[in-house]
Amino acid sequence: MAKLMMLTLLGLGLALFRDHRASYQTRLNAFREVTPVELPNCNLVKGIETGSEDLEILPNGLAFISSGLKYPGIKSFAPDKPGKILLMDLNEEDPKVLELRVTGSNFDQSSFNPHGISTFTDEDNTVYLLVVNHPNFKSTVELFKFEEEEKSLLHLKTIRHKLLPKYVYISELLAHKIHVYEKHANWTLTPLKSLDLNTLVDNISVDPVTGDLWVGCHPNGMKIFFYDSENPPASEVIQIQDILTEEPKVTLVYAANGTVLQGSTVASVYKGKLLVGTVFHKALYCEL
């Protein structure tokens, strides 16, 4: 009887494992392969080799890029080097990237591990950069002032709070969804709709001219978390038009199987130019 019970429990455990594994593989799109969708005028950005996980483009064409993210379970090509913020001027004929020097006596640059970034421009046209940082794999938000003439970032403040790791997700990565909320004057949110997609959606950028959404996506999330240089993670960029309508238009603008660009996380546009970032790899610059 005891042996029979043990075999029964073992069988139940294996069944639960198979069910859990199947669910995990489904959420990660583990068996999906990519059919390439190429753009005619694309080039890898020189000087970016260790990731471009998030980026934001100002209305004047200056792009801020976070690079060098190190995160548990994610591949890093420079595990012993601190992260950095790069600057790229999309108005240039052949734009180059420049590492922004960080100033400020209270900032530990050796543990800088930048993740998501956002910008804010005040009434005096002063640009501030807010950076999600993971020093020693903790979570903070760093506030910087962009000093354009000096090509530097002045560190103003580190924001710490026990609630910072509890996020509001607009893109739900493993559910393959984008959620749309209405923002009210009192900062509360009301859900309006959800859009289902056949890919793992990462960072979202909004075109300030058209209102279109541009999203960096992972066609197969399993390849992100279990990196294999012989079978690297693919990349996808989608454009979503009229997302508030009954039938939003979703266009696959770019797709690559990992031979050129691995693990796209973000895409943003400026005057017919597209910039695509990755979690740990390179960055791609295209003329649309």
Image (cartoon, rainbow, N blue to C red):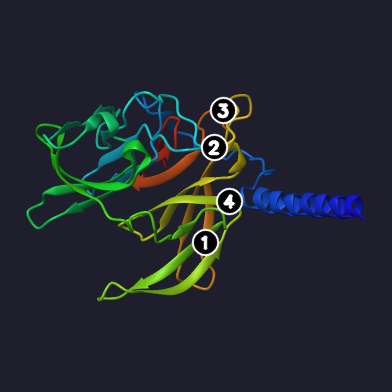
User: Left of 184 or right of it: where is 22?
Assistant: right
User: Residue 35 placed where, x, y %?
Assistant: 64, 40
The answer to whether marks 4 and 1 mark residues whose Cβ atoms lie closer than 8 Å is no
Q: Nearer the viewer, mark 4 or mark 1?
A: 4
- Pick the quarter of the image with the C terminus: top left
Earlier in the chain: of badge 4 and badge 1, it is 4
**Secondary structure at numbered mark 2:** loop
The answer to whether marks 3 and 2 mark residues whose Cβ atoms lie closer than 8 Å is no
Residue on which disc 3 sits: 259
Residue on which disc 2 sits: 38
**Secondary structure at numbered mark 1:** strand
Residue on which disc 1 sits: 249
User: Residue 156 placed where, x, y %?
Assistant: 13, 45
Q: Nearer the viewer, mark 3 or mark 1?
A: 3
**Secondary structure at numbered mark 3:** loop
Kindly identify the amino acid type of the residue bearing the numbered disc 1.
Answer: Lys
User: Residue 201 placed where, x, y %?
Assistant: 51, 52
Kindly identify the amino acid type of the residue bearing the numbered disc 3.
Answer: Thr
* Residue 98 falls in image quadrant: top left
Label 1, residues with CA under 10 Å away: few <14, some 14-19, many ≥20: few
Earlier in the chain: of badge 3 and badge 1, it is 1
Residue on which disc 4 sits: 199
Give how far apart the Cα atoms at labels 3 and 2 are: 12 Å
Kindly identify the amino acid type of the residue bearing the numbered disc 4.
Answer: Thr
